[in-house]
Image (cartoon, rainbow, N blue to C red):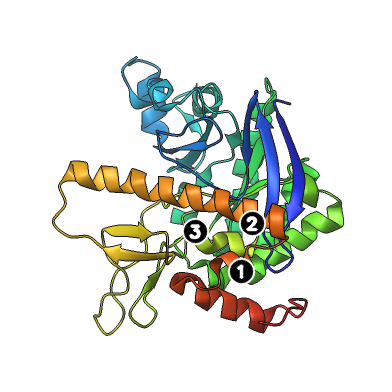
Amino acid sequence: MNCRIKQIDKDERFETRVMEMSVSGKKIITPSKTIDKVGIAGEVNEISLKVGKKDVILACSDTESKLNKLFSMRNNEAINVIIPEYQDFGFSVDGRDVLSKMESRIHMNTDIVVVPRWKGVFDLKNEGLLQDNLILHSKLFIEESRKLNGKLIMGNIPINIPELIIDNVVRFYLDEGITSFVLDYGTCLPRGKEHVVRSIQKTLIDSGDYESSLLYSTNVRRTHKTGSIYPADDLLTFCHGLDIIGNLHIGGGGTKSKDGTKTEPMIKEFVPSQYTYIERDGLTSGEKSTLKVCNCRLQNEETKKISDEIIENRSSYNYIKNKNGAKEYIETTKQTKLDFGFSV
């Protein structure tokens, strides 16, 4: 395998781990925030890919199609991770092996193979067959990847579905020898899914894989309004055991509450000193793209400071406790974790 994962340290107050991941000679230290398209050495370049049957069929005849241009989104210095979303159900179309053609294009352009988010399965809205369909699609993709593979495979776990199904999907992946996961929050806030993440962590501990695994968040709702501030909820997933903090790349999540008030700003600027977002209006398209990259970069710098704090002081608590955006998370941690064990 092209990947090695090991635990270096662990936060004594939060569930945060400092992990070292080496992939094809490229290394990152977690917690880490992904950087879209502009990652550098020591970072993760996340590539979002929405793909359907028509895209795969087109790629077989058109060399200029998006699936044949994935290489242009790579960054050879960073660790490239394609997060796919397959938008249809099943793979066979007119005798073509859609799964094989899709997997080959993904495999050649990613340093880590991630099982896709099966949007076509969710679109069926058949909860009775949800588990079977998720596992069947995942199993077929894994089998296709392993026909010719030396890369780490990460499972994809939707954590906004019934917990019994989540438990069975996790067990399926462990039976397949897959112990690192992308956790798809489905645009939920991280605090509401903390118990689900904890359950997955405990399962990894029981299987003996915890210290050589990674948890990678995606599709997290970035913020919510509490009082007069907007906490950086996506960054604060590190408090709940997430090692790599991904981007909100799948559409969803409202901006208005039931009473019509704004629950989060549309254009957000991250404030490192507070772990909050502020609203930015009147930006051009280019300025919005620049702001997005800047937010990722600043959050990545913060995760590096967090890992340094853990290594030096055994916890990042004292570093973040006075940041307004983190206070809600600290209070939740104090109330819900019996092993917190520290005076405040």
Rendering coords of residue 293 (x, y %): 35, 43
| Crowding near the residue tagged with mark 1, few <14, some 14–19, many ≥20 C-alpha atoms within 10 Å | few
How far apart marks 3 and 1 lie (CA) works out to 17 Å
Q: Nearer the viewer, residue 195 or 297?
A: 297
- Quadrant of the snapshot with the N terminus: top right
Rendering coords of residue 212 (x, y %): 77, 44
Q: Residue at x 63, y 76 (%)?
A: 333
Three-letter residue code for mark 1: Asn
The disc label shown at residue 318, or none: 1
Left or right of 153? Residue 192 is left
- Mark 3 or mark 2, which is nearer the start of the sequence? 3
Residues at circles 1 and 2 in contact by the CB criterion of under 8 Å:
yes
Q: Nearer the viewer, residue 203 or 326?
A: 326
The disc label shown at residue 150, or none: none
Q: Nearer the viewer, residue 308 or 39?
A: 308
The disc label shown at residue 309, or none: 2
* Label 2 SS: helix
Q: Is residue 262 above or below residue 50?
A: below
* Label 1 SS: helix
Please give the residue where the numbered disc 3 appears in the rendered image: 235
Q: Is residue 308 above or below residue 325?
A: above
Quarter-of-image position of residue 176: top right
Tell which residue pokes out farthest to the front in this image.
312
Task: Kindly report which numbered mark, 3 or 1, lies closer to the viewer in this rendering.
Answer: 1
* Camera sees residue 268: yes
Left or right of 13? Residue 323 is left
* Label 3 SS: helix
